Image (spheres, rainbow, N blue to C red):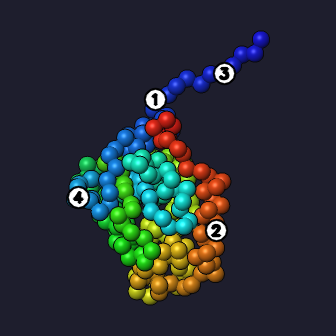
Amino acid sequence: MTIRNIIPFNPLDKRHLGESVGQAMLRQAVICMTDLNTFEGAGIYAIYYSGNFPAYEAVTMRNTDGKFNAPIYVGKAVPKGARKGGDLNANPGRVLYNRLTQHIKSIEDASNLNLANFHCRYLIVDDIWIPLGESLLIAKFDPLWNKLIDGFGNHDPGSGRHAGLRPRWDVLHPGRHWAEKCQPRAETAEQIIGEARDYLRNNPPPEDTSMINV
């Protein structure tokens, strides 16, 4: 007779805690990014695309008819100083809202994207759970702008610090003035589009997030 070693369920296991945060975020209302209103708090978020840019057909198919199942980007916003340790009860202010407005500016600067084609959902979370929730969501959805087309969340490195390569995101979506000062990449936009299609073919977005576990 074979004896199975069954691991007892531990509700405080870090994966289960991360799953609860991720599921809570996926239950939040979806908002068009043109309609984002000011709010307070820190937390996690997902951005969804539903336009006709040629690299993202598979993503758009999952984000139509009022259904948003395939985030193109997942991110977080933590209170200032959180990485160095500080007052756990400090007011985070509008850190999550400010992060989303930075993304809105990047989308608006891009010459081939339309903000009306972007939606988001977000969850205000206690500081300690934010990185865990973000990590679990990225691992589950493999968002294209997190995994393959880097640079969407980048900031201007500042004067005299543009010696690095231009982010792949800016090769595909030119328009941010600071990225144009960076060094050109060898890849063309057409090559990155081909890679994106291959990536989505090999990592198809889920058809229905209401039926999955984060």
Callout 1 secondary element = loop
Q: Earlier in the sequence, mark 2 or mark 3?
A: 3
Res 197 seen here: yes
Task: In the rendered structure, find residue 11 and report the number of the disc placed on it.
Answer: 1
Label 3, on which residue?
Answer: 5
Nearer to us: label 1 or label 4 = 4
Closer to the camera in the image, 200 or 58: 58
Q: Residue furthest top?
A: 1
Residue at 47% across / 87% down in the picture?
181
Identity, as a three-letter code, of the amino acid under mark 2? Gly
Label 2, on which residue?
Answer: 194
Closer to the camera in the image, 9 or 191: 191
Q: Earlier in the sequence, mark 2 or mark 1?
A: 1
Note whether 67 is above or below 176 in the view shown. above
Callout 3 secondary element = loop
Q: Residue furthest right?
A: 1
- Would you say 98 lies left or right of 13 here? left
Q: Earlier in the sequence, mark 1 or mark 4?
A: 1
Residues at marks 1 and 3, CA–CA distance in whole angstroms: 18 Å
x, y percent for residue 85: 36, 55
Res 99 seen here: no
Residues at marks 1 and 4, CA–CA distance in whole angstroms: 35 Å
Closer to the camera in the image, 156 or 29: 29
Residues at marks 4 and 2, CA–CA distance in whole angstroms: 36 Å
Identity, as a three-letter code, of the amino acid under mark 1? Pro
- Would you say 202 lies left or right of 67 here? right
Residues at marks 2 and 1, CA–CA distance in whole angstroms: 42 Å
Task: In the rendered structure, find residue 37 and report the number of the disc placed on it.
Answer: 4
Q: How many marks?
A: 4
